Image (cartoon, helix red, strand yellow):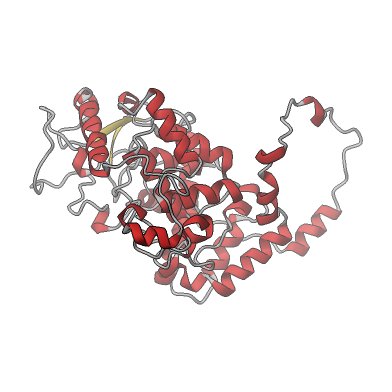
Amino acid sequence: DPSNLSLTEGFNGGHWGTLMPFLKACHKQLGEPRRPIQRHETFSLLSKVSPPSIWPESTPIHDLGLVDVNGKDRWDEAIIEAFPMSEDDALRSLENFFARGFHLYEKDRSRADLDHSTSKLSAHLRIGTLSPNELYYKMEDSSLPYSDRKTISRRLVWRDLAYYQLHHFPEMCEKSIRSHYEQTQWVSGEEERRRFEAWKRGKTGFPLVDAGMTELWATGWMTQSIRMIVASFLTEYLRVNWVKGCEWFHYTLVDADPAINAMMWQNAGRSGIDQWNFVMSPTAASQDPTGNYTKQWLPELSNLAPPVLHSPWKAPPEALRLAGVELGVTYPHRIIVDLEGERQTTLKNVIEMRHKNQNANDDRGYDLVLLPNGKETVVFTKKEFRIDRSGNVLKGPQTKKSKGSSKTGRGRRGRVRRVASID
């Protein structure tokens, strides 16, 4: 119950509402999660439960006004095939992951081109066919040292952190937690529509992005690393409001969760309790070094090899001809060409918005957020967004340690900040 947990405002080993203060508070105030009871005990209890003598009235499903999707848009069939939702399927997936991928997760979790790299348990956790407590103790009871399972263990904590944030900010699915970020200038009008439609349909001309969005539409799922690629591309380079990405993910993801999804997109859009302290490259493709992932979802590029597979506009014309690729015909031209220019526009728009809201900027250049209890707290703010009272970006090392200052630009002690999904 999020209402039973209390976090202190300010910086306490991390900013309010971020992972480490939350984790420490959970251990101190709530203790360890309860162990799930054995299944035979559950069945025994259920066998002793009698149904009500009179069932309560309910609305027939036919009266709910649900849309019956048919034809080419009937994409739920592939999702049901890929993710059968039963406890038996959840347990099979759990055992399969611990047999094949658990011991490799810390090393391979970002690899979209490896089948064993992620657990694919997120849908079962979301729908309730797998208990998070069961997964927690499955990991805790394993012989794997904590250092070799730290990330996946913490992703369960990220999950609860997302619920904690949603409890305090119930409108976070559509409204910025850093309320002044509502004033950020995004691309708009026809250009917004053009960019967003290309992104949704996997037609941006950036193969790794398009592979991810194609997989999402076909199966309702992507690895966490690819979700980060496509989210960063939408907000940082296409400059489309994060709310639109959040809505699309919620519509298409088989593991769509109002808390986890919103927290990821808030942080990607810079308006959450945390901010992604990195920008994901749409072309470096460290998530797909073999190219197998991109080739699987974009077979029209299957005759190209990395690195031009992920940047086909750099391939010599003869190489494209031999591969059967004609840009603009068999595969789209890039939706944007000047990545650096788009990124600089994003940066300029954020700085201008923050300059207009100095009341939400502390004297060290960090954002201030009003909590539901009426108190104000400082939240992590990416170094390139920190400004002084004149609106100038703060330069160089900070002589006085700020609450949450990062000297590396990659989070506390140089670590990349992750997001909340058990993939």
Q: In the figure, 337 relative to 81: above or below?
A: above
Residue 63 in sight: yes
Name the residue located 44 percent from the left edge and 32 percent from the top edge: 243
Image coords of residue 183 (percent x, y): 31, 23
Left or right: 229 in relation to 386: right
Residue 158 in sight: no
Name the residue located 87 percent from the left edge and 38 percent from the top edge: 52
Image coords of residue 242 (percent x, y): 41, 35
Residues 193 and 364: in front is: 193
Q: In the figure, 168 relative to 117: above or below?
A: above
The image quarter containing residue 96 is bottom right
Which corner quadrant holds the N terminus?
top right
Residues 274 and 251: in front is: 251
Q: In the figure, 186 relative to 386: above or below?
A: above
Residues 183 and 189: in front is: 189
Left or right: 415 in relation to 104: left
